[in-house]
Amino acid sequence: MLDKLEFSKSCYYYQENVLSKPDKYAQLRKRIKEMFNENKGRYGYRRIYGLLGKEGCMVSEKVVRQIMKQENLVVKIRKKRKYSSYREEISPAVSNVI
């Protein structure tokens, strides 16, 4: 079957081994979800990383970002519109006489 799929035997067994292992970030994943929901989805990975550091959980910022991406924990932000005092044409447009 591996010949038909053009898949090497070592890659197959490597993937089988990796997928059979339990998630080493299971507790961290749960805590990150809790923190995100406690703060009503307003905290991004930087703030959550800071809170984890205060709790004494030493983990990389990249790991926090990766877990948040895998769990689809995205901060909902309102897009700010740039201020513009211009509303409409105040005076009629000048005709082109050239």
Image (cartoon, helix red, strand yellow):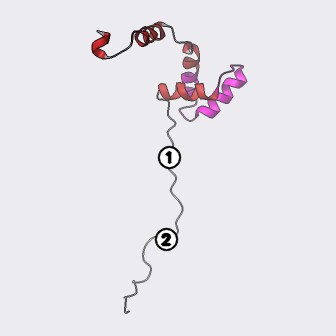
Q: Nearer the viewer, residue 11 or 53?
A: 11
Kindly identify which numbered label has been placed on residue 7: none
Magenta part of the chain: 32-60
**Structural distance between the alpha carbons of marks 1 and 2:** 22 Å
In the rendered image of this protein, does residue 90 appear above or below residue 44?
below
* Residue at x 30% of width, y 12% of height: 3
Three-letter residue code for mark 2: Tyr
Q: How many numbered circles does the render carry?
A: 2
Q: Position of residue 84 (x, y in %)?
A: 52, 66
For mark 1, give the secondary structure. Answer: loop
Q: Position of residue 11 (x, y in %)?
A: 43, 13
The residue identified by callout 1 is 78
Placement of the C terminus among the 4 image quadrants? bottom left
* Residue at x 59% of width, y 18% of height: 28
Q: Is residue 41 magenta?
A: yes
Tell me the quarter of the picture where residue 34 sits: top right
Tell me the quarter of the picture where residue 36 sits: top right
Q: Is residue 39 magenta?
A: yes
In the rendered image of this protein, does residue 77 appear above or below residue 18?
below
In the rendered image of this protein, does residue 76 appear above or below residue 53?
below
| Number of other residues with Cα within 10 Å of mark 2, as a class: few under 14, some 14 to 19, many 20 or more | few
* Residue at x 55% of width, y 17% of height: 30
Q: Is residue 78 left or right of residue 46?
A: left
Q: Which residue appears farthest toward the bottom when viewing the image?
A: 97
The residue identified by callout 2 is 86
| Number of other residues with Cα within 10 Å of mark 1, as a class: few under 14, some 14 to 19, many 20 or more | few
